[in-house]
Amino acid sequence: MVEKMGFSIRIADSHAQKEWDDYIESSPQGTIFHTWNWLKIMEKHTNSTLYPLQIFKGSTHIANYPIFFKKKGCLKVALSPPYTTEVLYLGPVLSAYESYKLSKIEENLIGIQSAIDKFLFSDLRCNFVNLRTAPGLIDSRPFRWAGYDIEPYYTYRIDLSEDIEKIWYGMHKTLRKKIKSERKNGIVIEQGDEDDLWLIHSETRRRFSEQGKIREDISAYLDEIYQTYHDQFLDILVAKYQGETVSGVIRLNYNGVTCQWIGLAKTEVKGISPNDLLGWESIKIAKERGMRWYEIMDGGDNPRLRQFKSKFNPELSIWYSAEKYSHPLYRMARTLSRKTGYHVKI
């Protein structure tokens, strides 16, 4: 156990799985990506070492903080989340966060990050750290005060506590018109299966390829995620036209939030646009299941995608990417790699 300013770190083991998951579920920042099984699957398929850190202040458990450690040559890296996992954000989870007074929240956040940094830079001797916080943790100052470079990102969320009719009329009128048109064209929305999972994966890679973007094959990772979560937390919706699947979306349903995770690639079938109807039906199903939020997951940095997603009249929900380096030379190398387009695979 590592101690810093009254804060201590414990590395959870497999015996603490239920305790870990119960804690994640108790927090508004807790996502399905934070759950024990998902973390272990990411560890396996990224060739990294998972450190599931539990943070204590005295004897009080105040945070869970999953960290993935990788070593590439002389470079030691800590990530949360690891790359190539289709996970936008991860980072710390704090229970009872919103019930505290601001002074206590600030004290805890500063103490947590100080303890984490000692573990990452002194114990693991990391050269580079990238931490991405989940929506709901709005205060990025403790990262900045700890010497991190902060970049804000935004995802889209729809408040499902509103009446479904209000959600419908809140959407752009051209979107509502297209949804009605797609129904008239004979597009139907159905529950998908494992075959549809692979169709969605293939179509998503096709669309990225058409845009000149190379995406790593995550088939083995995606298969294990599906086998682990599809009975309870993962489902698939597909759009069919004349009996054929023309689009689909993989959805994650956890802790009151339905996430539009992977899919909705533009179809190759001429004359139809199924994704507007597919998005709307997905929202309706989440509402019917009693979910609190519907998230159209996004990094918020692609103007082209904004045009489609904002038509559903969502709210912006901020999250942060925080980067820190053990020496200015690593920051310079990172900046240069971004300018040249050359990236070291981590």
Image (cartoon, rainbow, N blue to C red):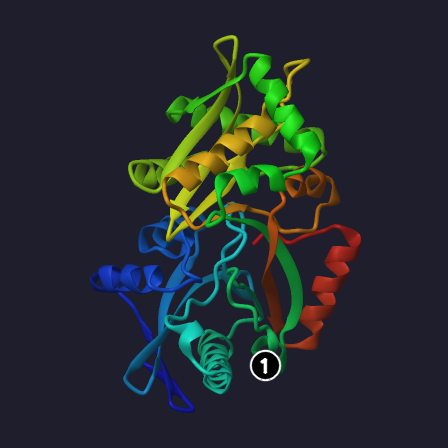
Between residues 311 and 123, which one lies in front from this camera angle?
311
Identify which residue is drawn at 63% across, 39% down.
Answer: 171
Above or below, 162 relative to 190: below
Between residues 209 and 92, which one lies in front from this camera angle?
92
Identify which residue is drawn at 57% across, 37% down.
Answer: 168
Identify which residue is drawn at 44% across, 62% down.
Answer: 29
Identify which residue is drawn at 44% across, 24% down.
Answer: 196
Circle count: 1
Residue 294 percent across, percent down from the top left: 49, 46
What kind of element bears circle 1?
A: loop
Q: Which residue lies furthest to the left in this view?
A: 15
Residue 221 visible in the current orientation: no
Residue 232 percent across, percent down from the top left: 30, 40
Badge 1 local density, few (<14 within 10 Å), some, or many (20+)? few
Q: Which residue lies furthest to the bottom in this view?
A: 5
Above or below, 302 relative to 69: above
Above or below, 259 relative to 140: above
Q: In which quarter of the image is residue 296?
A: top right
Residue 238 percent across, percent down from the top left: 47, 24
Q: Quadrant of the N terminus?
A: bottom left
Which residue carries the number 1 mark? 146
Q: Which residue lies furthest to the right in this view?
A: 339
Residue 290 visible in the current orientation: yes
The amino acid sitting under disc 1 is Ala
Residue 336 percent across, percent down from the top left: 77, 61
Q: Quadrant of the C terminus?
A: bottom right
